[in-house]
Image (cartoon, coloured by chain):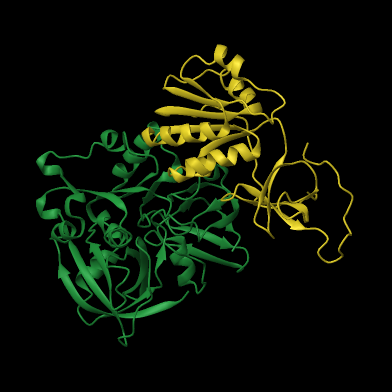
Chain colours: A green, B yellow
Amino acid sequence: MSILNVRVAEIEQVTDVVKHFTLVEENGRPLPRFSGGSHVVVSMNINGRIHRNPYSLMGSPENTDSYHISVRRQEKSRGGSVFMHDGVKVGSELQITYPVNLFSLSKLGKKHILVAGGIGITPFMSQIADLNRLGDDYEMHYAFRSAEHGAFVEQLKQMCGDRLHLHIESEGQRINFQNLLSNQPLGTHIYVCGPEPMVNALLLTAKDLGWPKTHVHSEQFLAPPIGESFMVQLAKSNMEIEVPGDMSMLEAMEEAGLEPDFLCRGGACGRCEVEVLECDGALMHNDHYLSDAEKASGNKIMPCVSRARCQKLLLNI
Amino acid sequence: MQRGYWIRSKPLYDSLVWQTPAVAHLVIAGGEGGIAVLKLFQQMYPKDPIQVLYTDLATANKNYSDILQQIVPEELELCDSEESLLNNLEQRLKDCTMGTHFYVAGSEAFMWHVLQKTRAAGVQDVDVQKELCGTLARPVYCVHCKTITRDVHHNVFPCSNCGRHLFVRDHFSRRLGAYMGVMVDAEEPGNIPQIEEVYP
């Protein structure tokens, strides 16, 4: 996978838990172009172990001088976001993947409704730049806990004008999905990024109101959940490796020197899918990619976020 | 069509089935597509508002205006031509909201004319239920003179505009709503394979 070497040019504390990082190419060359909604995967060397976290690109896709990502500090996680907050300084060098877009705007859309919860605002920042450039009809709905958690509100006001709708939970404002999704003109597409209950509530409302799946877009990157350690046998590589509790299968394979395919590392894209040849226990699917039927059949697993509880697991990789 | 091989652009069609949940339903049929509408109303039909647009067609072996008038319980509009049906549809689409489900039935040429209207309104082709009725006749686009000939029944036919003998392929353009027709005797003028009725 192609890697870009970047340097941190600027760090801005946006709220008490969100930091905004400006990244430039290490030799000052222009960075690759991308489309609104793209993300990059940042590699972090934390005490000798490589962590890779996906972050949405927030800048305008027209700006190739720098990339912009924002990181919310997650205390109860495996340390990637804490490292970004505490370990990364102006001048730090990082490795990132080329941008990949799993959350692109539908070119067929007549109108676009963007719905963000909290740090889920980040992919929309670059999408809004695209929408403004195309002159498309859109609404931006942004929900957050309280005024001091509203990251980038001033910037959004400038970008969106009266297309911006803020929903501040501490002031009793919640998005009414039923109202939002009713009476929208044909050709409307809706995009949601935020906490899982919010995303699920929106998806369910859209389904109940007869919206076709092709018009409903969501993005959720999951952090690999922490679990119990287990052993995996890799058929093609003829190896047996241990997956520690705080590591994903994908990370354990990388640690063992393998280079499995991946894109999002968050259970969304399906790129790292692996065939399960044998399992004498339970697969714990944590991804958003496989259908319920595929999960139940137990023939496939997404090693970026899913785990297993068994004595023997044999994967075709 | 060869065994184990198919052209991916060749559309496949289903039987119309009510899609729920929905906020409204719009059924559009022409000529022999009327039978698909009758079949819809033999299913338990949803409580949401239903509109049916139908036109008899001169090319159809059987038309259904009379019986639809008796069977369709609510908003049925009978149009007197495909053109007036398409104009009527265009107006109605302006008032439709997200959550409206679309159903179309008739010949392939008819259905893809309807789909050009729904697509222009922002509805994706995959989200429209489609049932092919009455005939396998194909609309065919001449790649040489860019003319579309409707209701082609044979594997090889003379283009309605330039007269070239065209071989009808399975390659289908959703934008044009037609199959690809290519000159069959371009390399050996006059060498035309046996003409057979394969799309009755």
Q: Can residue B189 be seen in this view?
A: yes
Q: Which residue lies furthest to the bottom in this view?
A: A27
The one of B114 and B2 positioned closer to us in this rendering: B114
The one of B178 and A278 positioned closer to us in this rendering: B178
Q: Residue at x 58, y 41 (%)?
A: B112
Q: Residue at x 24, y 58 (%)?
A: A74
Q: Is residue A194 visible?
A: no
* Apparent side of residue A70 relative to residue B185 in the rendered image (left or right): left
Which quarter of the figure is the C terminus of chain B placed in? top right
The one of B157 and A217 positioned closer to us in this rendering: B157
* Apparent side of residue A11 relative to residue A102 in the rendered image (left or right): left
User: Residue B147: horizontal and vertical position, in percent?
Assistant: 65, 52
User: Residue A268: horizontal and vertical position, in percent?
Assistant: 43, 55
Count of numbered circles in the view: 0
Q: Which residue is drawn at 43% across and 19% down?
A: B47
The one of A278 and B64 positioned closer to us in this rendering: B64
* Apparent side of residue B165 relative to residue A78 in the rendered image (left or right): right
User: Residue A124: horizontal and vertical position, in percent?
Assistant: 29, 57
Q: Would you identify the image quadrant in which residue A99 lies? A: bottom left
**A146 up-or-down from A265: above or below:** above
**B194 up-or-down from B59: above or below:** below
User: Residue A5: horizontal and vertical position, in percent?
Assistant: 35, 81
